Image (cartoon, rainbow, N blue to C red):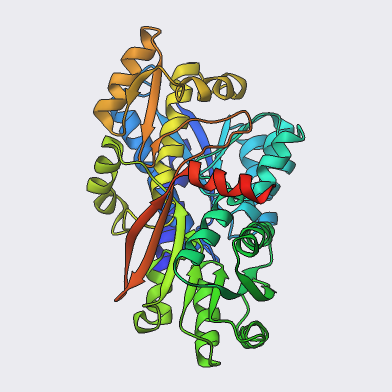
Amino acid sequence: MKKLLLATALLAGVSALPAMAADCDITVGVVMELTGPAGAYGQAGAKSVEMAFRDFNEAGGVGGCKLLTDTRDSQSQGNVAVDQATQLVNIKKVPVVIGGIISSVSIPILTSVTAPAGVVQVSPASSSPTLTQLARDGKTNGVFFRTITSDALQGTAAAKYAIDQGLKKLAIIHVNNDFGVNMMKEFSAAFTKLGGTITSTTPYNEKQASYSSEASAAMAGEPEALYLVSYPVDGATIARAWISGGGAAKFLLNDGMNSSEFIDAVGAQYLNDAFGTSSGTAKTASTDYFYGGYEAFSGGIKPDAPAADRSYDAGAIVALAIAKAGKGDAAAIKAAIPEVTAAGGEPIHAGKDEFGKALGLIKEGKPIKYEGVIGPVTFDQYGDITGPFRLWRIKDGQVTTVGEMSAEEVDKIKGEMAK
């Protein structure tokens, strides 16, 4: 009920904004998973974008005009997301869509709506390697950017982390969508190359009442632990089925399972041997700013909620790019995104004062480089970023960072796998 009220409040809050917009205000579309299996991610992400736009508007906006959001709920479903994005692009004529959170939402938005229309799309948390491949194949029109590293890298980092923790015989249960399938493939290739054994691989379909059959199937071969690639709601149901069926209370988890909702639903006492990886951060002044103010702004969502930090960065980069473009034109914004994150520019951090500084530099024609909550952000030709991976574990109901794996270390492992 609490989640439903929050989602309703988010929608109610943004739906009134376009009606109050001045003639020069610019509306950005936001398609987030406010409900459904990824609802916790989308609610955190939507609030982060809202916070970034608040900071930007208070700094002066685009020539005194405000950035507004028209936020839509994808319900964690690709077909719903496409419908909402189509309305935003074709009817509301937005130049940018921020979202989705999960890859199975972002990919259909990209292929069906934003790429054909030439509208910029920035995803805060869609990590599927398919998005890189679409760009390589020339199917994104160059409009797609994301503020998270690809699962092609995270799967490798997770495999190395598992081996380092002594987990050498694993079963895999993964969500049966583009994200889950790709994460499973990347992890499996690296894990076996590093000497591990995968006893079984079991896909599952979302939003089932029970996952007892999947848990039972995954226990074949007597694995010592379970690699669970999922989202908090379904993931908790699967973890409970695994434990109640006699599976070892040892887990390797993907980034989205770093969630208090997941821990509470499973029971902290069952997760003291749970480990995970997340797309990491390099601490900046933006990190301190965000962690100091987000919970109060969001109405109680923790700043370490999945997708919260990188959603602020997605909003900030979009805002700065619109300021650089000087107008709500998709082509100009697309060209401006690399320019506000380029090496050699004046470092800009999160918050009203920093955005005010950025607006002054842009007006003077000087280069800027946004250094975000997740660290300095630089996009390659495919709209991807690179960065470290955070290694964490759950202990006594709390997620604790225990180390970091550099992008260079992950690249080295991948290089050795190719030999």
| Between 412 and 105, the one nearer to me in the picture | 412
| Between 179 and 108, the one nearer to me in the picture | 179
Displayed quadrant of residue 222: bottom right
> Do we see residue 52 in this rendering?
yes
Q: Looking at the image, how many numbered discs can be counted on the residues?
A: 0
Examine the rendered structure and indicate whether residue 195 appears above or below residue 71.
below
| Between 235 and 247, the one nearer to me in the picture | 247
> Which residue shows up at 62% across the image and 28% down it?
381
> Which residue shows up at 67% across the image and 57% down it?
182
> Do we see residue 84 in this rendering?
no
> Which residue shows up at 22% across the image and 47% down it?
292
Q: Is residue 183 left or right of residue 295?
A: right
Residue 181, position as x, y percentages in the image: 68, 61
Residue 119, position as x, y percentages in the image: 64, 31
| Between 51 and 391, the one nearer to me in the picture | 391
Displayed quadrant of residue 115: top right
Residue 249, position as x, y percentages in the image: 46, 83
> Which residue shows up at 27% across the image and 54% down it?
295
Examine the rendered structure and indicate whether residue 251 appears above or below residue 364.
below
Q: Is residue 91 left or right of residue 368?
A: right
